[in-house]
């Protein structure tokens, strides 16, 4: 049928006015009207930072819905185009982003066509502009041809915005909460998208679908707050009140299909919206929604807009209420869902998909959860929080889980586990391990020996070939190392407790997941099956030393660190997500250093630097793909792996450099204060910068860390540093004259490069900081005796290439 599955679960008299489904049907049936086609010249449309000039061509409008025009099409009069779109991003980082994609910081493109859908005042603005020029006149004959030619394209684009149109046309906020979206065909850039959306924190977006090695990407060229928002003249529209206090009963059937029955508290928002949005995995389907015990209308669809929901693999569920909720009022939202979120990976190993969206969500507030699971008795289940009840009903096991503090998201895992526990004071670490290996990890059988097999003859029968039997290999199952994993997990938790203070919850469960990744829920950690092995075990034996270290220690410590960074302190927005992942990764490196020594830390950081300097197909380094604050925008067709490398690996270097600036004691104090000050809250990059500046030594050249963050966080660049020096004079008047040359970065790039002077027969070493700049920076040091060595940055205090 259509993309939307409509659940009409409401009483016949519930909505005396038009239902959501009826209004949605009108939107879907929207068509362009030939009689509303105009031959136009010099029609200007200004959308905040965008300026669009329809110089010479045709404007075709969609038929109004309830008196509102929601679509329009511009077609240039010639093949070479006769329209123009102009945009200048307001910040340096966004202009840099434009340069990476377009080769220029400014968009100024001649356009052939622009297919537009909108719920703001665009329709009225275009009609007014047409009326102001006497040349502009109706042209229904051309309109009939355009309608026929553009019908399939218009239908396809409309499907991406029909759910949003339903929300906006039902909103009491009117056009102030609207959007403008245009699919533009440019002469040089081809087809690209323009979006101005007042329900987003960054209203302006410019991007393009791109393909690389058969995979589809959406490259965001730039996104930023609109001019009137930056100037404080207009506020973000919409209502993002989250759901609170979840109570969920989940049943896993014999085939592990999932059914959930639950309820949560929905708080009425100040915007008095009548249509609200929930998020849910697309592997799940809502079967019923109620508000205060009464069925309500809902619509569930694939999220095809640019909100990021689709990229997370989720659907949106649109709630159509009988009437708007009073601001601050509290209501019971009941839900029933069903779907399949569990995949059998083979050998009795299970993979839980939809790990955080197996129940409807709205926002991600810290709140309470009460989870009850029913599942086949033959399997074991672990979930977020502490198990407070357990019973058996025939072939079904029933368990109840409650976290002992507020959390933002709940998860669970399922398998044929062996389990063990370790305690650290009032904290418990439980480790679950699969009893079998999934096929993707199971080693292949040894090859047959290439020997002539013996032939056995039986009188009256043909000869039988008997192949030599290889000695069966005893599989190294994950459970084999369970005690060691528990011991090392407890050691990591104890280490972080001492450094950062209390985590999100007092009970932590470590559980396996097929694949090569991990995920840290509050109180529940997924780690790759490979993390249950030591470097000498067969599943890891063919990996590089760095790979063996990553799976045997680093990954597990990283996910445990998320109990603080992500599940206790969380990011304010996508620009700040680097901070959470970087904190988790560098915390893991602190534990690796504690466990394996400083050399292990230096080896990992060295690999990170090499990865950042790896050249891409365009000849540029991975690090140059964008500033770390771009978040998931770093995953593009030009650099598919850049997001991970920059977010995790450059982020770890950023924190390492801060550590070297502050010293170990103050750096750990900074992390403890970050946890204390922002627990159960969000933290932004700027808030972190301001907090970090308080822990710097006095009398530095960058007391507020503004230059540091400008270079390493808000921009790109890894310098190449080369030092030359000469020692003159005799004791007690010795002088070191040196120069540090900096290349491969902008002229205004500047770092405090440490130069260490090693004296004979003494453990003390003198360190001076040389503030680099464009070209060369000289330095002079007076000494009482001749030094043994003068070394540039021997402790890797700066992310740089040293020659």
Image (cartoon, helix red, strand yellow):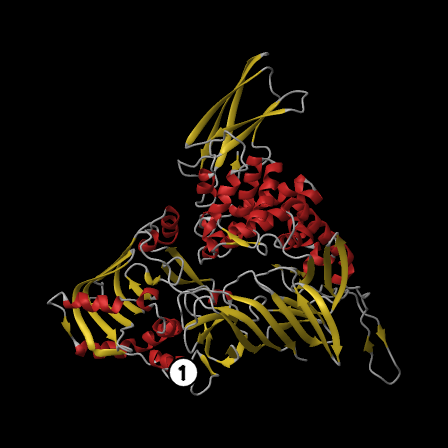
Q: Which residue shows up at 67% across the image and 48% down it?
A: 497
Which residue appears farthest toward the right when viewing the image? 459
Q: Which residue shows up at 73% across the image and 60% down it?
A: 431
Quarter of the picture holding the N terminus: bottom left
Horizontal placement of 48 versus 43: left or right?
A: right
Q: Quadrant of residue 461?
A: bottom right
Rendered position, 749 above or below 141: above
Horizontal placement of 525 versus 641: left or right?
A: right
Q: How many marks?
A: 1
Q: Position of residue 760 (x, y in %)?
A: 65, 20
Q: Which residue is at the front of the view, 553 or 240?
A: 240
Q: Can you identify the residue that label 1 sits on?
A: 15
Q: Position of residue 62 (x, y in %)?
A: 26, 75
Q: Position of residue 69 (x, y in %)?
A: 27, 73
Residue 472 can be seen in this image: yes
Q: Position of residue 127 (x, y in %)?
A: 20, 69
Q: Secondary structure at mark 1?
A: loop
Residue 476 can be seen in this image: no
Q: Quadrant of residue 128?
A: bottom left
Q: Which residue is at the front of the view, 515 or 491?
A: 491
Horizontal placement of 163 versus 443: left or right?
A: left
Horizontal placement of 547 versus 144: left or right?
A: right
């Amino acid at each position: 049928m259509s993309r939307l599955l409509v659940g009409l679960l409401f009483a016949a008299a519930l909505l005396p006015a038009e239902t959501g489904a009826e209004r949605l049907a009108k939107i879907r049936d929207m068509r362009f009207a030939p009689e509303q086609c105009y031959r136009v010249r010099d029609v200007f449309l200004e959308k905040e930072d965008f300026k669009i000039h329809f110089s010479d061509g045709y404007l075709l409008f969609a038929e109004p819905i309830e008196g509102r025009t929601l679509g329009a099409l511009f077609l240039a009069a010639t093949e070479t185009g006769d329209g123009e779109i102009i945009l200048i991003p307001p910040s340096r980082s966004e202009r840099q982003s434009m340069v990476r994609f377009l080769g220029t910081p400014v968009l100024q493109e001649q356009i052939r066509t622009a297919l537009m859908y909108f719920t703001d005042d665009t329709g009225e603005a275009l009609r007014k502009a047409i009326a102001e020029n006497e040349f502009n006149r109706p042209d229904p004959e051309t309109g009939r041809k355009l309608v026929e030619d553009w019908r399939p394209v218009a239908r396809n684009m409309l499907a991406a915005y029909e759910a949003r149109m339903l929300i906006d046309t039902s909103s009491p906020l009117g056009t102030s909460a609207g959007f403008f979206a245009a699919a533009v065909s440019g002469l040089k850039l081809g087809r690209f998208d323009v979006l101005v959306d007042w329900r987003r924190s960054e209203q302006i977006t410019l991007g393009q679908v791109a393909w690389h090695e058969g995979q589809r990407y959406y490259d965001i060229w730039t996104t930023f707050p609109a001019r009137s928002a930056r100037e404080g003249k207009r506020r973000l529209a919409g209502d993002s009140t989250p759901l609170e206090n979840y109570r969920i009963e989940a049943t896993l059937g014999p085939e592990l299909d999932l059914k959930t029955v639950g309820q949560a508290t929905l708080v009425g928002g100040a915007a008095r919206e009548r249509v609200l949005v929930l998020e849910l995995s697309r592997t799940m389907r809502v079967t019923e929604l109620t508000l205060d015990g009464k069925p309500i209308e809902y619509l569930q669809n694939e999220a095809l807009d640019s909100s990021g929901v689709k990229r997370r693999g989720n659907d949106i569920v649109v709630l159509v209420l009988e009437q708007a909720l009073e601001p601050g009022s509290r209501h019971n939202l009941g839900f029933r869902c069903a779907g399949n979120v569990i995949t059998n990976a083979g050998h009795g190993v299970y993979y839980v998909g939809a790990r955080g969206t197996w129940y409807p969500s709205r926002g991600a507030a810290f709140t309470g959860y009460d989870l009850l699971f029913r599942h086949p008795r033959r399997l074991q289940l672990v979930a977020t929080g502490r198990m407070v009840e357990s019973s058996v009903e025939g072939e079904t096991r029933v368990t109840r889980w409650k976290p002992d503090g507020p959390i933002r998201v709940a998860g669970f895992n399922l398998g044929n586990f062996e389990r063990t526990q370790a305690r650290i004071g009032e904290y418990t670490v439980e480790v679950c391990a699969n009893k079998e290996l999934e096929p993707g990890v199971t080693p292949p059988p040894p090859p047959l020996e290439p020997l002539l097999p013996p032939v056995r003859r039986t009188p009256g029968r043909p000869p039988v070939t008997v192949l030599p039997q290889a000695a069966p290999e005893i599989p190294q199952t994950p459970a084999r190392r369970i005690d060691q994993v528990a011991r090392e997990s407890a050691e990591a938790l104890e280490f972080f407790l001492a450094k950062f203070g209390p985590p999100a919850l007092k009970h932590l469960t470590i559980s396996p997941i097929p694949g090569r990744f991990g995920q840290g829920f509050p109180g529940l950690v997924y780690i790759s099956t490979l993390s249950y092995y030591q470097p000498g075990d067969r599943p890891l034996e063919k990996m590089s030393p760095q790979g063996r270290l990553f799976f045997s220690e680093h990954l597990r410590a990283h996910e445990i660190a998320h109990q603080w960074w992500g599940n206790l302190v969380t990011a304010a927005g996508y620009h700040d997500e680097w901070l959470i992942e970087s904190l988790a990764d560098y915390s893991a490196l602190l534990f690796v250093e504690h466990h394996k020594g400083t050399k292990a830390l230096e080896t990992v950081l060295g690999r990170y630097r090499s990865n950042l300097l790896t050249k891409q197909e365009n000849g540029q380094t991975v690090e140059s793909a964008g500033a770390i604050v771009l978040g998931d925008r770093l995953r593009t067709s030009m650099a598919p792996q850049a997001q991970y490398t920059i977010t995790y690996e450059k982020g770890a270097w950023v924190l390492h450099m801060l550590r070297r600036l502050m010293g170990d004691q103050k750096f750990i104090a900074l992390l403890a204060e970050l946890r204390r000050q922002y627990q159960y809250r969000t933290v932004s990059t700027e808030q972190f910068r301001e907090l970090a500046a308080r822990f710097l030594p006095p009398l530095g050249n960058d007391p507020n860390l503004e230059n540091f963050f400008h270079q390493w966080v808000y921009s790109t660049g890894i310098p190449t540093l080369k030092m030359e020096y000469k020692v003159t004079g005799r004791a007690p008047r010795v002088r070191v004259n040196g120069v540090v040359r900096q290349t491969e970065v902008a002229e205004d790039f500047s770092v405090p490069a440490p130069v260490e002077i090693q004296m004979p027969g003494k453990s003390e070493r003198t360190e001076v900081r040389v503030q680099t700049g464009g070209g060369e920076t000289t330095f002079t040091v007076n000494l009482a005796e001749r030094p043994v060595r003068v070394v540039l940055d021997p402790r890797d205090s700066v992310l740089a290439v040293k020659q």
